[in-house]
């Protein structure tokens, strides 16, 4: 039996962050409302879509409650990422809200940027974000986490079939992060769903534009918001793995299984060494 | 003084692997002197040793040593090696004086390599010191494991040569190119790959291959095209990717920035079966 699901990702207008709408979730809820008849299974919002970096929210914040209600209304999972203050620390946290409107998981960004650490006093998370949902396992990484191929690899080793990547990153070119995102999908046989910000016209010359997209395990972009704000939905069959015909053994194999079976983890110990920077 | 390095990768003709044509391949290598290369990378098993594996003292290394000495260039390639313990895919690096300075055995063996050639797996991923910097070698199937590239990068490889044969492992041309660029971006290394080309008429529907050189910013700076030939590029190994770090606006070397953010103590799962 195939596991068909409908995945949505949002590209938010970046100006909503810097104008008075910061920490106001209404504009997000209005966008999500457009999905009411789309029967989506999971929806991802961009990193810090509430503009909360300078004023982290308590975990019992109102926007999160509003999103929980919306998730319940739409009978969908929602991934919402913002800065929260918990136990005296600030974390960049992705919350997984289930179809009943309850928080069923959270992931704290493991690799904060230098600015997050020094300026905003963000504390790193220490656990990978893999969550068992009713259709399969998902993984979450936030923004800079993508720079570390180990993160996606570990999420896939823990069984994640889709990795969500809420971010607000620009990269050094449009090509930069999209190339890395596609490589993570291919290397690990996963779907990768990014959620980022957009800019409305006019485009600024020389400015890298961002967008949100869904990449399949072959590295193909199967849905993309383009450079404007909006939502895209893709149908994904989680049982439709990236298969190829093995000419040698004359059989169809699942690429991810093939690669993972041939790994040599006992030889990868060097990856656990502490960084040594001059 | 900047470390300027001329890299040449050969996109050899696949039919050149027929025994009658291998001498012609050696002649072509000899003709590369006009490019004044610092390092030459040759396609995977160009000497067609899979049915008759050699020792490292065998004809392939002997002939390449003479050429490396004449060209005053490093040469890297791979071939099927046999020793008292069995068979391996062996990648070698020969220095400008014609001396073998390093070898590594492919550590991940594909289904075909296992089934038909009964190959043993290598156990180490060395990085080699050369007179202009540090080089890592990646052979065949090892390419598809980011862990390999991560280890070479942590050992401070600046150029990584992927000695490739084909894309018969499965992915499409697009996936291989995406991965190549991503390896360069992820690990801030120059990536050079030597593969095989073919002359027209091209068989319709068959994937064509090429050799290329990608700088440490993920940009393809030289490519051979699909036909047999070469790709050559000059890279400055001291030209590192510097960036402004967000709100601090201070230039930093990107690789250092990312390295400082790594959390290796959390990556244990990578090393578990």
Image (cartoon, coloured by chain):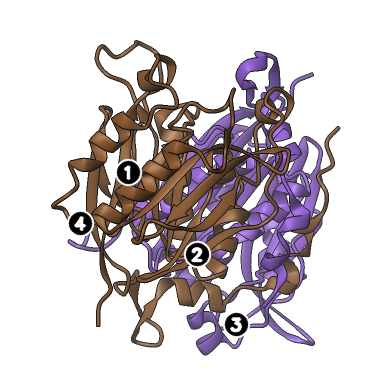
> What residue is pinned by disc 3?
B52
> Which SS class for mark 3?
loop
Q: Is residue B100 visible?
A: yes
Camera-side mark, 3 or 2 = 2
> Which SS class for mark 1?
strand
Q: Are marks 1 and 2 in contact (CB under 8 Å)?
A: no
* N-term-proximal mark, 4 vs 3: 3
Q: Colour of chain B?
A: purple
CA gap, disc 4 to disc 3? 31 Å
Q: Colour of chain A?
A: brown
Camera-side mark, 2 or 4 = 2
Query: Same subunit under labels 2 and 4?
Result: no
> What residue is pinned by disc 2?
A131
CA gap, disc 1 to disc 2? 21 Å
The chain under label 3 reads: B
Q: Are marks 3 and 2 in contact (CB under 8 Å)?
A: no
> What residue is pinned by disc 1?
A213
Residue B151: x percent and y percent? 72, 55
Residue B40: x percent and y percent? 62, 46
The chain under label 4 reads: B
Query: Same subunit under labels 3 and 2?
Result: no
Density class for disc 4 (Cα within 10 Å; few <14, some 14-19, many ≥20) is: few
The chain under label 2 reads: A
Camera-side mark, 3 or 1 = 1
Q: Residue at x 43, y 58 (%)?
A: A102
Q: Is residue B12 visible?
A: no
A121 left or right, relative to A255: right
């Amino acid at each position: 039996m195939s596991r068909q699901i409908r995945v949505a990702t949002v590209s938010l207008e970046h100006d909503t962050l810097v104008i008075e709408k910061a920490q106001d979730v209404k504009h997000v809820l209005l966008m999500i409302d457009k999905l009411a008849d789309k029967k989506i299974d999971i929806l991802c919002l961009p990193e810090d879509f509430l503009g909360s970096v300078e004023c982290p929210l308590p975990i019992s914040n109102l926007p999160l409650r509003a999103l929980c209600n919306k998730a319940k209304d739409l009978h969908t999972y929602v991934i919402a990422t913002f800065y929260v203050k918990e136990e005296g620390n600030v974390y960049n946290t992705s919350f997984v809200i289930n179809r009943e409107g309850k928080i069923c998981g959270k992931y704290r960004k493991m690799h904060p940027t230098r600015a997050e650490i020094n300026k905003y006093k963000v504390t790193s998370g220490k656990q990978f974000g893999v969550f068992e949902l009713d259709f399969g396992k998902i993984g979450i990484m936030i923004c800079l986490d993508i720079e570390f191929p180990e993160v996606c690899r570990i999420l896939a080793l823990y069984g994640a079939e889709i990795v969500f990547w809420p971010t607000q990153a620009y990269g050094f070119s449009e090509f930069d992060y999209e190339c890395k995102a596609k490589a993570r999908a291919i290397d690990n046989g996963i779907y990768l769903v990014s959620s980022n910000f957009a800019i409305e016209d006019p485009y600024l010359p020389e400015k890298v534009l961002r967008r949100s997209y869904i990449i399949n395990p072959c590295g193909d972009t199967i849905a993309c918001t383009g450079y404007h704000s909006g939502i895209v939905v893709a149908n994904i069959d989680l049982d439709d793995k990236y298969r190829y015909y093995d000419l040698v053994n004359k059989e169809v194999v699942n690429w991810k299984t093939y690669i993972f079976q041939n790994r040599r983890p006992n030889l990868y110990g060097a990856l656990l060494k502490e960084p040594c920077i001059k | 003084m900047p470390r300027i390095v001329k890299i040449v990768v050969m996109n050899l003709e696949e039919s050149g692997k027929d025994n009658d044509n291998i001498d012609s391949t050696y002649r072509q290598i000899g003709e590369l002197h006009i490019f004044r290369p610092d390092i030459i990378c040759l396609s995977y098993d160009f000497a067609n040793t899979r049915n008759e594996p050699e020792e490292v003292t065998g004809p392939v290394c002997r002939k390449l040593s003479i050429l490396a000495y004449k060209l005053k260039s490093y040469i890297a390639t791979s071939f099927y090696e046999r020793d008292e313990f069995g068979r391996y895919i062996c990648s070698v690096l020969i220095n400008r004086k014609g001396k073998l300075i390093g070898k590594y055995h492919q550590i991940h063996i594909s289904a075909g390599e296992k089934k038909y050639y009964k190959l043993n797996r290598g156990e180490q991923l060395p990085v080699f010191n050369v007179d202009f910097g540090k080089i890592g070698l990646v052979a065949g199937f090892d390419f598809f494991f980011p862990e390999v590239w991560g280890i070479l990068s942590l050992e401070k490889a600046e150029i990584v040569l992927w000695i490739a044969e084909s894309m018969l492992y499965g992915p499409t041309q697009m996936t291989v190119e995406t991965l190549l660029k991503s390896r360069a971006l992820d690990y801030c290394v120059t990536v050079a790959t030597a593969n095989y080309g073919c002359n027209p008429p091209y068989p319709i529907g068959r994937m064509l291959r090429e050799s290329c050189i990608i700088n440490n910013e993920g940009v393809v700076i030289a490519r051979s095209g699909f036909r047999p030939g070469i790709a050559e590029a000059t890279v400055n190994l001291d030209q590192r990717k510097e960036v402004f770090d967000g709100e601090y606006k201070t230039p930093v070397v990107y690789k250092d920035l990312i390295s400082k953010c790594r959390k290796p103590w959390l990556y244990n799962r990578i090393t578990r079966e």
